[in-house]
Image (cartoon, rainbow, N blue to C red):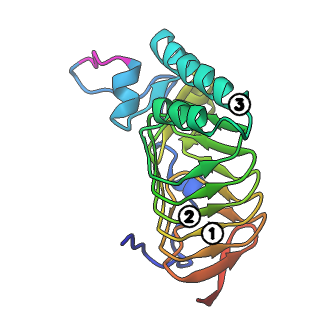
């Protein structure tokens, strides 16, 4: 069971809350130099530079797999399943994702059993994207974990970050929903078409609008 804190007026929007504090063109460092690779920084949840050869190659492998998946037909279910198992961190039984399907790395995405995602899902998995069981995802939904600094210096320096997204069991995301970095959506919640989810949503509510607001319990 996935639970989350109900939204409140003093909870900052996820896009803004995910941004690092003011910093120069490079992230601040202590007396010890940071010898980690950009991939190691990214996996640790720290600021990193995406324009890095190792990360670029990792992403190219994922995009090649996604392109192969998107080129399949509805008559090639076994091949589709094989490609998704290669692309994603894990995928449950009887889960269907209709192409086209776009990812950053793929391996940071876990999807439970009996889920359905309609055409055009974009899941940018710089940080983890965790999707529970029995989730319904409408067409052209975007799950966006990446963030960029508000300050011009580090943004010009191509520093980025990310915040994980968690979608609970039996959630329904209507067509065109955008889920922003750092958001958790509780079990059995419904998000209306076109909503932009910037804050956590509790379990068993209906939320609509931009930004998404809870209008009633379910």
In terms of depth relative to the viewer, which is nearer, 59 or 69?
Answer: 69
Sequence-wise first label, 2 or 1:
2
Q: Which residues are magenta?
A: 33-37
Say whether residue 148 is visible.
Answer: no
x, y (%) of residue 65? 58, 24
Q: Residues within 10 Å of mark 3 (few under 14, many from 20)?
A: some
Residue contact at pointers 1 and 3, CB within 8 angstroms: no
Taken as a whole, is the magenta stretch helix, strand or loop? loop
Reply above or below: 14 against 162: below
User: Of discs 3 and 2, which sits in the foreground?
Assistant: 3
x, y (%) of residue 39? 39, 22
Residue 68 numbered mark, or none: none
Task: Residue at 33%, 35% (x, y): give it.
Answer: 44
Q: Residues within 10 Å of mark 2 (few under 14, many from 20)?
A: many
Answer with the quarter of the image where residue 103 lies: top right
Task: Residue at 60%, 43% (x, y): give it.
Answer: 123
**SS category of the residue bearing label 3:** loop
Q: Is residue 135 left or right of residue 177?
A: left
Residue 172 numbered mark, or none: 1
Sequence-wise first label, 3 or 2:
3
Mark 3 lies on residue:
72
| Distance in Å between CA atoms under marks 2 and 1 | 6 Å
Mark 2 lies on residue:
135
Residue contact at pointers 2 and 1, CB within 8 angstroms: yes
**SS category of the residue bearing label 1:** strand
Q: Residues within 10 Å of mark 1 (few under 14, many from 20)?
A: many
Magenta run includes residue 35: yes
x, y (%) of residue 34? 28, 19
């Amino acid at each position: 069971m996935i639970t989350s804190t109900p939204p409140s007026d003093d909870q900052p929007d996820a896009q803004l809350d995910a941004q690092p504090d003011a910093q120069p063109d490079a992230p601040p460092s202590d007396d010890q130099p940071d010898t980690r690779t950009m991939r190691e920084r990214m996996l640790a949840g720290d600021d990193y530079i995406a324009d890095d050869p190792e990360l670029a190659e990792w992403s190219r492998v994922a995009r090649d797999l996604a392109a192969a998946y998107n080129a399949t037909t509805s008559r090639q279910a076994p091949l589709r399943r094989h490609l998704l198992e290669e692309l994603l961190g894990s995928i449950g039984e009887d889960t269907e994702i209709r192409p086209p399907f776009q990812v950053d790395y793929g391996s940071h995405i876990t999807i439970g059993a009996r889920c359905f995602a309609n055409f055009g899902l974009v899941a940018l998995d710089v940080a983890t994207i965790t999707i529970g069981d029995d989730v319904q995802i409408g067409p052209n939904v975007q799950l966006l974990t990446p963030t960029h600094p508000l300050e011009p210096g580090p943004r010009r320096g191509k520093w980025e970050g990310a915040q994980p997204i968690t979608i609970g069991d039996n959630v329904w995301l209507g067509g065109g929903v955008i889920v922003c970095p750092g958001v958790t959506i509780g079990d059995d919640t419904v998000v209306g078409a076109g909503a932009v989810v910037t804050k956590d949503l509790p379990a068993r509510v209906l939320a609509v609008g931009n930004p998404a607001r809870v209008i009633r319990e379910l």
